[in-house]
Image: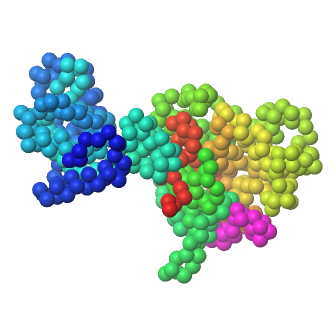
Amino acid sequence: MTEPTSIPLDENQIIAERRAKLARLRAAGNPFPNDFVPADRAGRLTTLHADMTREQLEAAAVKVSVSGRMVLKRVQGKASFATLQDATGRVQLWMNDEGIGADTHDAFKHWDLGDIVAAEGVLFKTMKGELSVRCSNVRLLAKALRPLPDKFHGLADQEQRYRQRYVDLIVTEGTRATFVKRSRTINAIRNFMAGNGFLEVETPMLHPIPGGAAAKPFVTHHNALDQQMFLRIAPELYLKRLIVGGFERVFEINRNFRNEGISPRHNPEFTMMEFYAAYTDYRWLMDFTEQIIRDAALAAAGTTALVYQDKPLDLGQPFDRLTIVQAIRKYVPALADAPLDDPGFLRGELRKHGVDLTDVRHRNAALGALQLALFEETAEPLLWQPTFIVDYPVEVSPLARASDTRPGITERFELFITGREIANGFSELNDAEDQAARFRAQVEAKEAGDEEAMFYDADYIRALEYGMPPTGGCGIGIDRLVMLLTDSANIRDVILFPALKRED
């Protein structure tokens, strides 16, 4: 033992002391036993016995065995207390020489916060009414060499919380709750889809041709095939191949990878749920997407009336439905009566917002694309309550079915909540010749410098030539949805291990 000192130990000193303790444990036997399986969990013990009186609990003589990480410890003369934390909650231990033996008790006094501990005993309540285990046996299962963060401050550095998520989960109850809600959200969506006749499938993450979205892919090389491959930017084209094959309702909860910027709403790898249903259109998709999101909210949060970043958010109301122009006129009073069908006017407004009109995406943009660009600069961030924006122009929707009545418009929507895109869906283009022409236009855009333009996928065209029934398809951003349901401001808060720059 080190001599008492008033100077706080730094982490290196603490680790050195703990390594010395571990060396002594090794000398005495195996310090990492693997022969203990707890019969009980802290959360369930609390649920079952918290309301029992001290007398009732004493009479019941409930024997338990528990294990977890020791997060609190107090030695008081002849007795000691400890708090174990498992995945379900916390439980207090009480022990003395008589219960566990003097040697074991003395050994316990040298254990550290963070150690993994097992205990057996009988439940009782302290004089303060705290549910506890009167221990008959305690064991050290795993030695923690690094100290836990200070209990009052936790992990103060946000980047450290992301980088060392394992520590964040140990010490931050809110973080654990966030990821429990994430799991419930995904399970609710999976169950909802299965309950509506959808077949869950898995499609490739390594693509010979990236497709299904306008995005810059990650590029790799497969040695055995000696060919360039791409990490999936979207599963869309593979899922629609399955519609061609006769699976009329399919979905995939999938990881996508896009080689683009990192921001509070973007991570280079992210989770989406994409689904496709034959004999439906974008109107059916909007109704169904509303149902999915409400069901997920009820499962994760228990309500559709949420508060996000201190502002009310109502997922229970019918979602609004507006065209791009209607949204601009509604949310931007200065443009309510503006000539939004005048390309010259639109370009002037975009310049005011600092948009580079010489960029390849804007240089030859038609009316619809200019309207969309202005919407993104002005109205989009203001769409707090759930709003479907409908009727996107053909030139920015290369996989969507064109309207039968409105030239240049597709049967497409995007769902915005709290100013963020949450979902994107449309009546699928099932005309092989039209799709081939649109792919060729995308190739021309790519050759002109647009890195996010699509490749020509000859096999997908071949699949369409076999015939695809009328189909609707939609993708829902799981990470962004979980942000809403957990009141998280940053997408990194809902991804267990977000992308970070490598440590030096």
Residue 432 on image: x %, y %: 70, 65
Percent coordinates x, y for residue 167 in the rendering: 39, 47
Q: Between 107 and 460, which is closer to the camera in this rendering? A: 107
Horizontal arrangement in the rendering, residue 128 relative to residue 489 (left or right): left
Most foreground residue, 321 or 128: 128
302 is higher (above) or lower (below) than 148: above
Q: Is residue 461 in the magenta section?
A: yes
Seen in the picture, residue 489 relative to 143 is either above or below; the reply is above
Question: Quarter-wise, where is residue 217 in the image?
Answer: bottom right
* Residue at 78% in and 44% down: 377
Query: Which residue is drawn at the image coordinates 65% and 36% (left, top)?
Result: 418
- Residue 159 at x, y percent in the picture: 51, 48
Q: Is residue 36 above or below residue 220?
A: above
Say whether residue 416 is left or right of residue 34. Answer: right
Residue extent of the magenta highlight = 442-463
Residue drawn where x is 11% and y is 27% of the image: 61
Q: How many marks?
A: 0
Is residue 231 shown left or right of residue 12?
right
> Does the image show residue 388?
yes
> For residue 171: magenta?
no
To which quarter of the image does residue 326 belong?
Answer: top right
Q: Is residue 247 visible?
A: no
Q: Is residue 362 left or right of residue 140?
A: right
Residue shown at 54% from the left, 35% from the top: 487
Report the coloring of the rendering. rainbow
Picture layout, residue 454 above or below residue 177: below
Q: Position of residue 383 (x, y in %)?
A: 70, 36
